[in-house]
Amino acid sequence: MRAATRTAALRSAAGSLLLTTLAAGPADGAPLVPDTPAAYTAARASSPDAAADRGTAVAAARAAAAGIRFGACADGQDMPGSLRCGTVTVPLDYAHPDGTRIRLTVSRVRATQRDPRNSKHRVPRQGALVYNPGGPGASGMYFPLAGLLPEWKRLGAAYDLVGYAPRGVGRSAPLSCEDPKRFYKGPREAPAHPSEAYKRERIAAAKAYARGCAERAGRALRFYNSLNNARDLDVLRAALGERGLTFMGASYGTYFGAVYATLFPSHVRRMVLDSAVDPDPEQIWYRGNLRQSAAFESRWADFRDWVAAHDDVYGLGRTGRDVQRSYDTARARLAAKPAGGTVGPGQLQGAFLDAGYFDDVWAARAQALSAYLRGDPAELVQQAGPHQEAAAEAENAKAVYTAVECNDAPWPTDWKVWDRDNTRLARVAPFETWDNAWTNLPCAYWPAPRQRPLDVRTAPGELPPTLVLAAERDAATPYEGALETQRRLAGASLVTERDAGTHGVAGGPNRCVNAYVDAYLLEGRTPGRHASCAPHREPEPYRP
């Protein structure tokens, strides 16, 4: 599931700050209530690995006893002083909890306990709210900064805001599949209907990438998967001293959040699943990616129609079809002469893929395309060009993404299946189809064992009420995924932002959605089986 990793709220909170190094310091954590392996004696019959269940119990008990020593964040001099960092230790292989162990980095801002609407009113602390922004491969280390935003202040008053870097990400036993210096290769092609020769090139590249992952990670490669991400989450819960986990996951975070709910339903306090991945085992991950590529075509059309509606600003065409022709003209020019020597059709496609995720980039992308076609490539190079200072982080994110998705489920190993399915789909959905296929193709040649996806589901009364959020036209996680998540998690409520498609809706511009989130996390109130919100306002056109 090719997925962006930035909700609108967190992108605003974090800005361009990078937090890549953590240091432990003096303990300032909350009193911890030890957990014990006995708490896991009612392990689910559907659990895929009893040994891993026992190992999770051991690791959680150790983490509860040790806690997390939060201290200053190294390289965090530009961060607010209230942000503190630490680590939690987890087994690499939960079936062998006394074997190799790795450290996950964690960040936290304490609950302010101050009512943002009345500074004299003290708000009761409700524990820790743990967040995962998705990916796979994204870091949540910036999440506590969301408490600085007006939309998050009420939650930041009641909860410690906790982010972390999942296994493989950042400094959490980082995974790498190639030299970061070679990661950004530009310019790059991006044919919507690739030739046989181009397909052979991409097959060779996918095989080489899969080999690189195996060579760099060794035997550890198989342990980067969604089941272990869910188990890590339970160890983090214990380390934070939380009897019940309060969790918000976005995008891919909804999938292993749902896996967590299946494995540890009695450990859930409250859970928000924002922009839900379809957890049906048949959709993990090959078919889910095909469905995503189809959905992107509709969202790409939404963007083109918006640009056409503002032809007086951008001059890219008065209809969506005209805007497509302008985009195709830019592709052809970039193929002949890359902008700035680095931006070719592949970089253009990557930049405009963001428009399928987030409508808050629509104005900037349209302006960059308009300026380029008028002879000024500067904005396009800035938005689409490779930024070498971020190469290591981007390479790491791709490595984790690939490892988790390839490890999680069986993939077709016959290229003819990939070629057939993506050729058919590209006839009606050319915008993302082949780019998505190339991203995932290493899974066809993956050297580590594949798992069978967990059958995500809970019985009535087994899990506390959960809250699922979805934008009706979300392309990254199509709406069917939210419906399926709600169906499988008994008692779940679904809040839909109608006729909108931004990926990640919690804490964004829709006050109706935010009100439902606050009511649930602050008061435990759910809106019943279904609720809906009108769409947030479309972006305003950018005028240079």
Image (cartoon, rainbow, N blue to C red):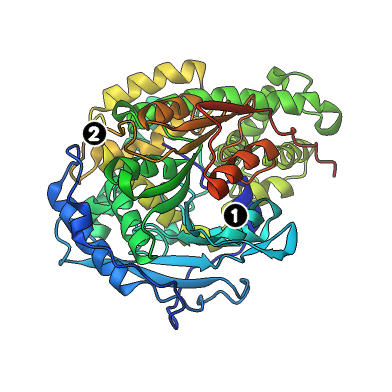
- Residue positioned 13% across, 52% down in the render: 51
Q: Position of residue 9 (x, y in %)?
A: 63, 49
| Relative side of 469 to 240, left or right | right
Q: Which mark is residue 410?
A: 2
Q: How many marks?
A: 2
Which amino acid type corresponds to the residue marked 1 in the rendered image? Answer: Leu
Residue type at the position of mark 2: Pro
Q: Is residue 93 visible?
A: no
Q: Earlier in the sequence, mark 1 or mark 2?
A: 1
- Looking at the rendered structure, which numbered label has been put on residue 155? 1
Quadrant in the picture for residue 481: top left
- x, y (%) of residue 382? 67, 51
> Residue sitting at 43 percent across and 34 percent down?
277
Q: Is residue 497 left or right of residue 260?
A: right
Q: Which mark is residue 321?
A: none
Tag in front: 1 or 2: 1
Compare residues 532 and 341 and report the one nearer the observer. 532
Residue at the limit of the structure toward the bottom, as seen here: 26
**Quadrant of the rendering where the N terminus is positioned:** top left
Compare residues 278 and 294 and report the one nearer the observer: 278
At horizontal 74% and vertical 18% (from top left) the residue drawn is 319
Give the spatial CA distance, label 1 vs label 2: 39 Å
